Amino acid sequence: MRSDQFPTSSTALPTRRWSGRKLLIGVMAVFLVIILAVMARLLFAMLDTKLIWVFYLGASIGLLQNHIKRSRALWRRLNVLSDWLALERFNQSYSHPDLNGVTVIIPAYNEAATLRQTLNAIPSTVCGLPVHTLVISDGSDDDTPIVATQRQAYVCHSPLQRGQGAALRLGYHLALRHRSRYVVTLDADGQYIPSEMEILLRPLLDGEADFTQGSRRLGTYELESRLRIMGMFLFGWVIRLLTRHSITDSSNGFRAIRTDILDHLTLLEDQYHASELLIGSILKGYRVVERPITMLRRQAGTSKKGRSLVYGWHYARVIVGTWLRGG
C-alpha cells in the first residue's frame, strides 16, 4: 500500500459530537438495563426458595440413584457370598447326599415351632418314588436347623435372611446338582397337608404337565385374610390377561415341578418368588396345570410376607416385570 493512504501526524482527525437524540437513546438504554436488573432480582427473590428446593430435589434424586446402584451391587455380592458359604457348609456336612426321586424343599425362617409337625407329616415315598426332605434355613436364629436335623432332613443354612425366593433358589440348585427328578415346595408353617403332594405329582408322572400348581380355590381353605383372598382373585385375573393361561391361585406355595426345567428359568426375586416362577414357566412354554389342595390357617408364628398392601404392591410389580422380560 502507498504511504499517502495512512494519516500523518499533521492530518487533522474529525471530531465526534453527540447529538441530543443519541444522548437520549443512551440514557434510556441505561435506565432499561437498570429496570431489567431490578425486575430480575425481584423475580429471583420470589422464586429463591422454590429454586433451592428444585435443585435440592434434583441433586437428591441423582445421589439416591447412585446410592441405589451401589447398594444393589453390594447386595448382589453379599448374595453370592451367602450362597457360597451355605453351599460350602452343606458340602462339608453331607459328602454324598441322596436327593434322587422326589425332593421336598422347605424354606424356613425361624419356624422351629411348626417345622417338626410339618416334617413328621411328610411321607417317605410317594407314587412309588423315594421322598427326601431339604430344609433351607434362611438366616434362622432359632432352633430351625436343629429341628430339621433331628427329623433326618437335609439342612442348608444361609447366614443371611434374604427371603423365600432366595432360599428356594438354593434348594433348586442343590436338587439340580444332585439329580433330583421332581421338586415339591412346601411351607414350614403347617398350612399345607404334605400327604396331598401325590395329587400334585400325578400329572408330572403321567406326562400331562411339567409344573403343577396347588390351588386352594379349586380345593378348600380356611379364611385368614379377606384382603389376600381378594388379591388372589385379582392377580389370577391379571395373570390370565397377560399370559392367556387360566390360574386360580398364583401365590400358592405348594407345587410340584420337573427339576430339569428349573435350569431354564430366570429367577431373580429374593422374596416375591411365586409369581416369577409361575409366569416364567408359562412364558417359556412349559405345561402348567392346577390341582385342588387344602390350605389351613398358620399353626403358629406370624407371616413373613409383610402387610397385605405392601405384599400386593410387590407381587404386582413382579408379575408385570416377569411378563415384560418374557419370563
Image (tube, rainbow, N blue to C red):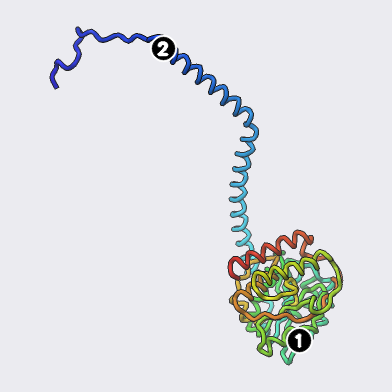
Q: Neighbour class for label 1 at 10 Å: few (<14), some, many (≥20)?
A: some
Question: What residue sits 19% from the left and 7% below the top?
Answer: 10
Q: Quadrant of the N terminus?
A: top left
Q: Residue furthest left?
A: 2
Q: CA distance from mark 2 to mark 1?
A: 104 Å
* Place of residue 155 in the rendered image (x, y in percent of width and height, measured from the top left): 72, 76
Front one among 317 and 190: 317
Task: Please tell me whether mark 2 or mark 1 is closer to you in this view.
Answer: 2
Asked if residue 116 is positioned above or below residue 63 in the image, the reply reads below
Q: Are marks 2 and 1 in contact (CB under 8 Å)?
A: no
Quadrant assignment, res 131:
bottom right
Residue 290 visible within the image: yes
Quadrant assignment, res 310:
bottom right
* Place of residue 188 in the rendered image (x, y in percent of width and height, measured from the top left): 79, 73
What element does badge 1 sit on?
Answer: helix
Q: Which residue is mark 1?
A: 198
Question: What residue sits 56% from the left and 26% below the top?
Answer: 40
Q: Which mark is residue 95?
A: none
Q: Is residue 15 left or right of residue 104?
A: left
Asked if residue 134 is positioned above or below residue 70 in the image, the reply reads below
Q: Earlier in the sequence, mark 2 or mark 1?
A: 2
Three-letter amino acid code of the residue under disc 1: Glu
* Place of residue 62 in the rendered image (x, y in percent of width and height, measured from the top left): 59, 47
Q: Neighbour class for label 2 at 10 Å: few (<14), some, many (≥20)?
A: few
Q: Which residue is mark 2?
A: 21
Q: Quadrant of the C terminus?
A: bottom right
Q: Residue furthest bottom?
A: 128
Residue 134 visible within the image: no
